[in-house]
Amino acid sequence: MPLRAVMDTNVLYAAFRSRLGSSFEIFRRLRLGAWTAVVSNHLVHEYEEILKASATELGLSLEDVDELLNAICARAEE
C-alpha cells in the first residue's frame, strides 16, 4: 500500500515555481502513484485559492489550475 499523506499548500505552490526542487519531486511522485494524497474540501479550496491567485506568476491559466486540481482529486482520498 502506498504512503498516504497530506500535501501542504506551500509544497504544491513551490512545485510550480520550480521543477528542479524537492517540492516538484513530491508532486511528480504523486502523479506516478508512488503515494496517495489525503485531502479535504477545505484543503482543495485552499489549493485552488492560492494557485489561482498566483496563476500568472506560475505560468498557469485558470483552466490549467482546474485541470491540476481535478488530477489531484482523482488520485486522492478524502
Image (spheres, rainbow, N blue to C red):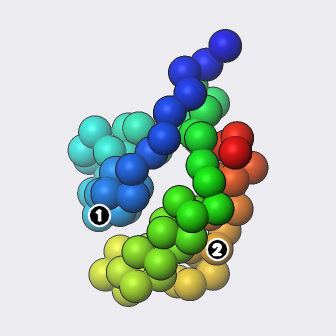
Q: Residue furthest top?
A: 1
The x and y percentages for residue 76 are 67, 43
SS at circle 2 = helix
At 69% from the left edge and 53% from the top edge, which residue is drawn? 73
Quarter of the image for the N terminus: give it. top right
Would you call the spot at circle 2 few (<14 residues within 10 Å), some (14-19), or many (20 or more)?
A: some
Q: Looking at this view, is 44 or 27 the one in front? A: 44
Q: Work out how far the residue at label 2 is from the one at label 1, CA to CA, in angstroms.
A: 17 Å
Q: Looking at this view, is 60 or 6 the one in front? A: 6
The amino acid pointed to by label 2 is: Asp
- Do labels 2 and 1 touch, CB within 8 Å? no
| Residue receiving disc 1 | 17
At 45% from the left edge and 45% from the top edge, which residue is drawn? 7
Specify the label residue 66 is tagged with: 2
The amino acid pointed to by label 1 is: Arg
- Vertical position of residue 10 compared to residue 34: above or below: below
Q: Quadrant of residue 15?
A: bottom left
The x and y percentages for residue 58 are 35, 74
The x and y percentages for residue 20 are 26, 47
47 to the left or right of 11: right
Quarter of the image for the C terminus: give it. top right
